[in-house]
């Protein structure tokens, strides 16, 4: 009987690891940016000529930076969530229009509603690259001193907002 | 008129020659350069299509990152600096060769540990086996077996 103990233990161990592996999402790569200051940027503002949004614009405030594009289908999934979040007025929601264009972004927001206090237009995606964006939509929570506190890759769900984003916002205010 | 025509042809001939040579020169330069871009890109993971390098992938992010690699090379950045740039944004995961540090010790040394354990197990098993000769058969059994082999069935 004892002779089966070791193989059994190994089997159980491997089974536990494989079982865990079934529920891991390989797309959720831990961001090295959490706990770091946001990269500096200065981008043209949508629907406001000669005006810019910079990395310093929201200094002293807790804000959410949401990376979106009119060509991004999953962005549509989270859009109602962002509209809801913006309407609660608990946190500033800023958009980063990623590899898109002024006209298409404005049209898209006109059609689906605009939850953003400001939209920065990043046509060539270089600012997105500095934010380590690789799957639109992505959402960052930034504290008063400009440090990234939370990042979500892929569409936000209402659970993400209720259980993670908003409690963090409260603790940072 | 003929002289003019001749001059013109000669001129265009040499002009095209000069174009040819510069074109060749720049392509030679860029072949070398592209080789460098490719070799760096081949060590970076495309995060959209995770089992491809950014050299292999045509996802738009991979194209952007390849352009970024070539831009940084043109700025005279070293391979190390480019990799550092990528890691700062996308994490160690972007490297196909993960760095050796505390978090990756299991990854780097785990297989060797397992190999050592397996060898130790094998060796100890072999030694044990050699130390105690086959005790499953006693001398009477052996005698019976020999009889069987001789075809001397009556013995049983």
Image (tube, rainbow, N blue to C red):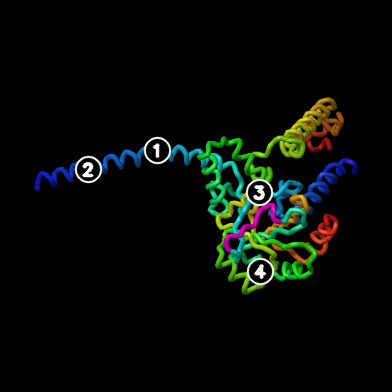
Mark 4 → mark 3, Cα distance in angstroms: 28 Å
Q: Residues within 10 Å of mark 4 (few under 14, many from 20)?
A: some
State the residue position of label 3: A40
Mark 2 → mark 1, Cα distance in angstroms: 22 Å
Mark 2 → mark 3, Cα distance in angstroms: 52 Å
Q: Nearer the viewer, residue B79 or B46?
A: B79
Residue B87 visible within the image: yes
- The circle on residue B28 is 1
Q: Please check whether the numbered discs 1 and 3 fall on a single chain.
A: no
Q: Report the magenta residues as a range.
A: A49-57
Write down the chain letter for disc 2: B
- The residue most toward the top is B131
Mark 2 → mark 4, Cα distance in angstroms: 59 Å
Q: Residue at x 45, y 37 (%)?
A: B32
Kind of element beneath mark 3: loop
Spot occupied by residue A171 in the image (x, y as percentages of width and height)? 85, 56
- The circle on residue A76 is 4
- Which secondary structure dominates the residues rendered in magenta? loop
Q: Any magenta on residue A52? A: yes
Q: Nearer the viewer, residue A9 or A170?
A: A170
Mark 1 → mark 4, Cα distance in angstroms: 47 Å
Write down the chain letter for disc 4: A
> Which image quadrant is residue A1 in?
top right
Q: Nearer the viewer, residue A66 or B103?
A: A66
Kind of element beneath mark 4: helix
């Amino acid at each position: 009987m004892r002779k089966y103990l070791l193989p059994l233990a190994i089997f159980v161990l491997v089974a536990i690891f494989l079982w865990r592996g079934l529920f891991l999402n390989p797309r959720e790569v831990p961001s090295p940016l959490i706990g770091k200051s946001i990269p500096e940027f200065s981008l043209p503002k949508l629907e406001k000529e000669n005006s810019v949004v910079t990395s310093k614009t929201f200094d002293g405030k807790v804000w959410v930076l949401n990376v979106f594009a009119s060509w991004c289908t999953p962005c549509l999934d989270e859009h109602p969530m962002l509209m809801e979040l913006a309407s609660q007025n608990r946190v500033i929601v800023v958009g980063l229009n990623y590899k898109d264009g002024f006209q298409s972004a404005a049209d898209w927001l006109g059609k689906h509603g605009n939850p953003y206090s400001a939209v920065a237009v990043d046509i060539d995606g270089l600012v997105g690259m500095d934010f380590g964006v690789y799957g639109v939509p992505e959402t960052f929570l930034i504290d008063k001193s400009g440090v990234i506190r939370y990042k979500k890759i892929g569409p936000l769900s209402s659970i993400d907002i209720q259980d993670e984003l908003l409690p963090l916002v409260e603790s940072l205010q | 008129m003929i002289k003019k025509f001749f001059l013109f042809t000669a001129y265009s001939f040499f002009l095209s020659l000069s174009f040819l040579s510069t074109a060749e020169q720049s392509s030679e330069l860029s072949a070398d350069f592209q080789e460098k871009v490719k070799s760096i890109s081949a060590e970076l993971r495309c995060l959209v299509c995770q089992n491809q390098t950014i050299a292999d992938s045509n996802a738009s992010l991979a194209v952007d990152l390849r352009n970024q690699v070539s831009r940084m090379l043109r700025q005279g950045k070293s391979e190390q600096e480019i990799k550092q740039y990528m890691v700062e944004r996308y994490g160690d995961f972007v490297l196909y060769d993960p760095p050796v540090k505390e978090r990756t010790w299991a990854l780097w040394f785990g297989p060797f540990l397992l190999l050592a354990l397996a060898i130790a197990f094998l060796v100890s098993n072999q030694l044990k086996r050699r130390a105690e000769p086959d005790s499953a058969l006693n001398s009477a059994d052996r005698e019976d077996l020999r009889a069987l082999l001789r075809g001397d069935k009556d013995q049983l």
